[in-house]
C-alpha cells in the first residue's frame, strides 16, 4: 500500500502516506469487528487511505505539489482507482520503483538501506538495527534524515538507466540480501525463521530478474543463494521448536525443487566476467546441497571459496565462518586463533551472541570446558531467540558434564 500510494502522491509525501496507511488499518480494526468483513478488504483499505490522503492535501492547500499520477487519479472514479491499484502488476511495479527511489545515490548508503527496509519491507527500527549491526536510536536518525531528504528534493519514482542503474543496483542487492537473512535467522524471540521475509526477498528478486534493468548475473547469483538456503527450511527446526544444526539435519527433507531452481539460477549467473559476493556465497551454499551427508562436505573446496570471499568481503562474519570451516578440517586451535585475530573481536564477543556461541562450541570441541561454559553462557545472555537459547543451554550442559568428568 505504501509503495503504490507513494507512486501516486510522490516521495515528498512519504510521511503522510505512512500515516494514512496506518490510519486505514486502525479504522479497519475499529469497524470490521462489529460486522462482516467488506467484500474486498484490500480495496477497502486502499480506498480509505487514498481518500484520507486527498483530504489532507486539500486541507493544507498543497495542490502545487501534486504529482502527475495524482492529477490523473483525481479525475477518475474512486472505484476505478481502487481496482487499478491492486492489479498484481501495479503492486509489483510500484514496489520495485520504490526500492530504486529509496536507493538514490544522493542518500548515504546506510540511509538507503534503512529507508528501503522500512518503507518497502515494513521492517521495524529494531529489526533494521539488528540487520545492520547497530542500535535502534541510530536507525531512527537515519530514517528521519532520509525522509527529510526525499521531502525536500522530490525524488521521482522511476527506475534509472545507464550509470545511474549501476549505482543503485548494488544497494538494491544489499537490501534483498539483508531482508532474506533477517527472515532466515530472525531476531524475533519466538520465531527463528520468518518465512514471510524470505519469500518477500525472493519475490522481489524474481521481479528484478524479469526486468531488463535487473537481468544480470549478480541478480541470478543472489536468487541462487536464496533458493539453496530456503531449501533447508523444513529441516532447521524440530517439532518442539529446537534448532537442528546442519550436521544433524535430515537431508531427505530438503526441498529438491528449490535446489534445482537454485542451480538453474547459478548457471545463469555464470554469464559475464564479474565475480560478486553473491556468486561465491551461492557456490558455498551449493556445496552443502551437493554433499549427500555432512561428513561428505568438501571442506577443502569450502576453504577455497571462503578465501575468495574474504578477498572481496573482509568482514568479521566472513572471517568467523572461515574459522568454522577450519575447525571442520580438524584445525580447531587454528580456528580459535583466527577468531581472536578478527579486528574488534572483543566488542563483537561482548555484543553479538554468534561470536560467543562459536567460540564456546570450538572450545568444547577441544575439551576446554571452562572456556566453553564461559562463552556459551555469554551467548545465552545475548540472544533473544528462545530456540537459540534452548540450543545453547544444551551445549552448556554438555560442557559442564565434560568438566565433571
Image: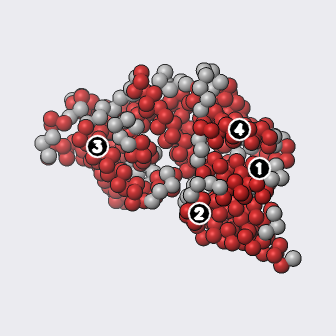
Instruction: Give residue 346's mark.
Output: 2
Q: Secondary structure at mark 3?
A: helix
| Mark 3: few/some/many CA within 10 Å (<14, 14-19, 20+) | some
The residue carrying mark 1 is 326
- The residue under the point 43% across, 27% down is 165
Q: Nearer the viewer, mark 2 or mark 4?
A: 2
The residue carrying mark 4 is 305
Q: Are marks 2 and 3 in contact (CB under 8 Å)?
A: no
Q: Secondary structure at mark 1?
A: helix
**What is the CA distance from the residue labelled 3 to the residue labelled 4?**
40 Å
User: Is 324 located above or below residue 278 in the figure?
Assistant: below
Residue 220 at x, y percent in the picture: 60, 29
Q: Quadrant of the N terminus?
A: top left
Q: Nearer the viewer, mark 3 or mark 1?
A: 1
Residue 193 at x, y percent in the picture: 61, 53
Q: Are marks 3 and 4 in contact (CB under 8 Å)?
A: no
- The residue under the point 82% across, 49% down is 329
**Residue 39 in view here:** no
Q: Is residue 27 left or right of residue 310?
A: left
Q: Quadrant of residue 12?
A: top left
**What is the CA distance from the residue labelled 2 to the residue labelled 4?**
27 Å
Instruction: Give residue 188's mark.
Output: none
The residue carrying mark 3 is 149
Amino acid at each position: 500500500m505504501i509503495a503504490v500510494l507513494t507512486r501516486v502522491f510522490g516521495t515528498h509525501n512519504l510521511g503522510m502516506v505512512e500515516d494514512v496507511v496506518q490510519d486505514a488499518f486502525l479504522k479497519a480494526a475499529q469497524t470490521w469487528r462489529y460486522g462482516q468483513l467488506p467484500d474486498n478488504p484490500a480495496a477497502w483499505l486502499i480506498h480509505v487511505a487514498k481518500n484520507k490522503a486527498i483530504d489532507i492535501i486539500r486541507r493544507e492547500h498543497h495542490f502545487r505539489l501534486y504529482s502527475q499520477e495524482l492529477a490523473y487519479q483525481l479525475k477518475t472514479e474512486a472505484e476505478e482507482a481502487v481496482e487499478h491499484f491492486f492489479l498484481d502488476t501495479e503492486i509489483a511495479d510500484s514496489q520495485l520503483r520504490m526500492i530504486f527511489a529509496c536507493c538514490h545515490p544522493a542518500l548515504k548508503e546506510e540511509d538507503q538501506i534503512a529507508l528501503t527496509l522500512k518503507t518497502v519491507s515494513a521492517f521495524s527500527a529494531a529489526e533494521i538495527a539488528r540487520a545492520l549491526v547497530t542500535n535502534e536510536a541510530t536507525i531512527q536518525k537515519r530514517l528521519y534524515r532520509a525522509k527529510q531528504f526525499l521531502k525536500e528534493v522530490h525524488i521521482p519514482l522511476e527506475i534509472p538507466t545507464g550509470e545511474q542503474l549501476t549505482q543503485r543496483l548494488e544497494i538494491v542487492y544489499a537490501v534483498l540480501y539483508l531482508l532474506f537473512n533477517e527472515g532466515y535467522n530472525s531476531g524475533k524471540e519466538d520465531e527463528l525463521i520468518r518465512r514471510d521475509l524470505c519469500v518477500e526477498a525472493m519475490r522481489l528478486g524474481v521481479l528484478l530478474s524479469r526486468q531488463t534493468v535487473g537481468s544480470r548475473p549478480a541478480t541470478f547469483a543472489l536468487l541462487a543463494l536464496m533458493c539453496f538456503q530456503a531449501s533447508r527450511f523444513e529441516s532447521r527446526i524440530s517439532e518442539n521448536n529446537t534448532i537442528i544444526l546442519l550436521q544433524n539435519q535430515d537431508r531427505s527433507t530438503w526441498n529438491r525443487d528449490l535446489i534445482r531452481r537454485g542451480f538453474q539460477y547459478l548457471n545463469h549467473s555464470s554469464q559475464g566476467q564479474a565475480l560478486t559476493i553473491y556468486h561465491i556465497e551461492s557456490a558455498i551454499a551449493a556445496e552443502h546441497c551437493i554433499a549427500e551427508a555432512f561428513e561428505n562436505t568438501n571442506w577443502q573446496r569450502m576453504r577455497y571459496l571462503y578465501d575468495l570471499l574474504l578477498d572481496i568481503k573482509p568482514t568479521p562474519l566472513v572471517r568467523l565462518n572461515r574459522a568454522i570451516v577450519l575447525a571442520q578440517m580438524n584445525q580447531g586451535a587454528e580456528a580459535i586463533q583466527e577468531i581472536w585475530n578478527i579486528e574488534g573481536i572483543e566488542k563483537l564477543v561482548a555484543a553479538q551472541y554468534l561470536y560467543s556461541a562459536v567460540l564456546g562450541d570450538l572450545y568444547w570441541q577441544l575439551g576446554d570446558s571452562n572456556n566453553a561454559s564461559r562463552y556459551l553462557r555469554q551467548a545465552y545472555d545475548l540472544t533473544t531467540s528462545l530456540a537459540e537459547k534452548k540450543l545453547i543451554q544444551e551445549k552448556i550442559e554438555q560442557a559442564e558434564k565434560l568438566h565433571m568428568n
